Amino acid sequence: MKVVILEDEPLAAEKLSRYLSKYSADMEILQVLDALETAIPWIREHQTKADLFFMDIQLIDGLSFEIFSQVQLNKPVIFTTAFDEFAIDAFKVNSIDYLLKPITFTDLSRALRKLESLKEQFSKGTDIAPLVPRLRDRTYKDRFLVRVGNHIHSVASVDIAYFHAEGRDVFLVNTEGRRYLVEYTLETLEELLFPKQFFRINRSFIVQLNTIDDVVVYANRRLKLSLRPKTDREVVVSREKVGAFKQWFEGI
């Protein structure tokens, strides 16, 4: 896959390039651009060579949304930004995903898997804009089947307190404190759960907004959570997730 990166911070562009190479050896960085002044003419002349664009929204000479008013870009775009105030605008154009900085490898992988799941709908030169409402209006899983002995129960998402991983096993804990083994990875659950209600705070926990009793500033600028029902495991927001967690917790 040939990728174009539009990013005015050299370190951020280098980090993104490194993550792309880690994701797949087939990733080729076709071009790195750092401003609208250079991006717009390049896209006019060369966009057919690219398969995917990563665009930082806020550039040194304006917002990357301006590109779409000057060029008909018919390739999928993944936006990156330090702020989430532009989310609605991002999905008005050819956006496959919207990644908040600092971007993690997990965030990037999830966005690329989303693109891969749709790739059969894309062809060279196809305008993907009609697919955007389908992505924006997607539905999320509101029930999970769990097994109790020889019986199968249905647990509504609103009754889930959190998910946590122990080794390769993932458990659903409901608001009454009952624990059930589920056949999902946390990565898969991130795709299935409503993102305004659930947040993955670290490698082991996905928490539900209404089950957070308290948030305490912890060592190394991390945050420690008290959940309801209580767990005997330490529940700490990883350092790279703190910024995104605060915005999620605030309801931004």
Image (cartoon, rainbow, N blue to C red):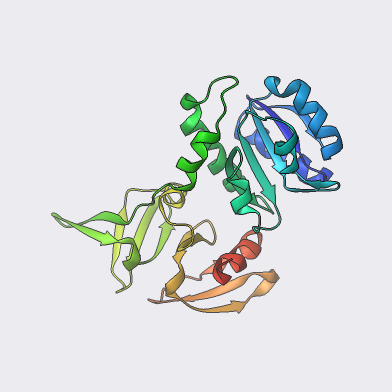
Residue 200: image location, x then y, percent: 51, 59
Where residue 90 appears, x then y in whole percent? 62, 47
Residue 142: x and y in percent read 32, 56
| Residue 220 placement, left or right of 110 | right
Q: Nearer the viewer, residue 54 or 144?
A: 54
Residue at the (76%, 25%) spot, across then down: 44
The x and y percentages for residue 23 are 60, 35
Given residues 102 and 92, the one toward you in this image is 92
| 224, above or below 68, in the image | below
In the displayed structure image, the side of residue 196 where residue 169 appears, left or right: left
Q: Residue at x 40, y 77 (%)?
A: 228
Q: Residue at x 57, y 74 (%)?
A: 224
In the picture provided, is 38 more to the left or to the right than 194?
right
Is 136 located above or below residue 122 in the figure?
Answer: below
- Which part of the image, by quadrant, shows the C terminus? bottom right
Can residue 34 be seen at all in this image of the molecule?
no
Total numbered circles: 0
Q: Quadrant of residue 5?
A: top right
Tell me the residue at 85%/48% (across/down): 60
